[in-house]
Image (tube, grey):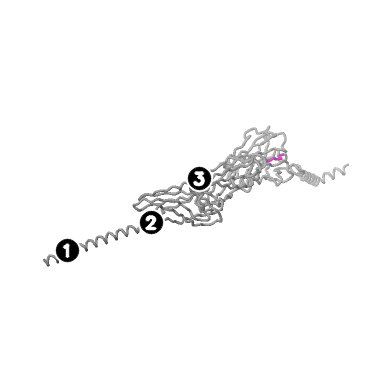
Amino acid sequence: MQKKSIIWGIILIILLSFVGFTAGAVNTTTSSSSSADPTSLVYVTSVSMDPEVFFPYEEGTVTITLANKGDTAIGLENPQILSKNVHITSDDAWNTVTYIGPGTEATYTIPITVVPPEGTYYPLFSLGTKTGLSIHYPITVKIDSTDLEALISGEPDTFALSTKETVNLTLINPRSGALDDILISACGSGLEVSPSQKYISYLGGQSSTVIPFSVTARQDSSLTFNISYRNGDSKHAVDLVIPVTIGADKTAAVPIVNNIAQTQKGSYYDLTGDITNAGITDANGLVVTTGSPAQGTGTYPEYVIGSLASDDSSSFEVTFTTTDLSSVPLVITWKNEDGDDYKVTKVLNLNSASGSASSAAGTGSGTASGSSTVQAGGPGGAPPGMGGPSGSTSLFSSSKGNGISSFYPVIAAGIIVVIGIVLWTKRKWLSAKLKKK
């Protein structure tokens, strides 16, 4: 009997020990589970700003995404941004509780406005939960009043009349955030601008772009660039104005005429000479002819030289009729590489060269017999180098002492010398005749 009591006692002790161990294990598990709040498994995965950088007092949005990595749905409520420089403009959309399920995400897009001073701020995003705990996360907000910059990076000193010139507009975004929907409108009185508008969808932070414009000026004017753009949903604008002054085209071809020679062939005259391009660019489709009152006729009423490169030269020949050799317009026309028309008129005095084959330099001496006018599509757009400062020039002159009349003294002296020689050789014969008388 005593042995049975001992055996049952041992069995009872073993059972009690097993029950105590199991209960301890259960209590440990329960305690561990209760100490891990499901809210701790909800965290912020991304934050974005629109715009990336705010102007002072500008409105925009901040978008915050959270993920739930736990296995329990969590109720989220009352999102806040805690900062004296960043204010939520409307929280009506978040008055209700939003539940984020296990393994899912929740996104808050919160409208905000910012107030100066400028700088970088770190407001605190705060979000309450139904469990009573809160989620906190610092975000970054930048405020900068720096505007888009516009400048001219390339333009001519002066604009040749009715000639296409290139103006390069450079846009610089000095901000750390991108700018969108940039629209450039170019205009000016008496100006033809191409393109008149230019659209740029995106200009990244701290970057720039160059936009070329073709400008044809028909008068002195001002070229205005109106530039609008968006920073987020907010619209901004800047303007740039540059003067447009009509002047000589410094890059144009400059035809120089020299070695003029004129001969008469029956009822018309034949004029030959050389043309040198002293300009910077080529003269394309160069044609030489005469203007009124002279009229082209005969073999070469117009002489086509074609393309004349810079620093190159070519000869020409024109035939014409006229009743006044003292005023013969020599007309030279050509085009530049853009197809713009240029025209030079040299008024020649050919009296002293009439009936001869003599030649003279294109800048000959003597009194000017006419004017040399230059135009690029109209008056005033002349390339330099044709004529003197006042626009007058002379290739030939009929002033006293020029032509055959300048040899009269020499001829008279020759005649006197010949008479003297004859009298000297016949002196004895003449003496004998005089003695007989």
Which residue range is magenta in the image?
A: 346-350
Q: Position of residue 271 (x, y in %)?
A: 66, 38
Q: Secondary structure at mark 1?
A: helix
Q: Position of residue 374 (x, y in %)?
A: 66, 42
Work out which residue is located at the far front of the displayed protein and give it: 1
Residue drawn at 69 percent across, 34 percent down: 292
Residue beneath label 2, please? 40
Q: Nearer the viewer, mark 1 or mark 2?
A: 1
The 10 Å Cα crowd at callout 2, few under 14, some 14 to 19, many 20 or more, is: few
> In the rendered image, is residue 150 in sight?
yes
Of residue 193 and residue 183, the one placed in the foreground of this image is 183
> Which of the labelled discs sits on residue 201, or is there none?
3
Q: Amino acid at mark 1?
A: Ile
Q: Position of residue 148 (x, y in %)?
A: 56, 50
Residue beneath label 1, please? 11
Q: Amino acid at mark 2?
A: Ser
Q: Nearer the viewer, mark 3 or mark 1?
A: 1
- Quarter of the image for residue 4 reads bottom left
> In the rendered image, is residue 315 in sight?
no
Q: Secondary structure at mark 3?
A: strand
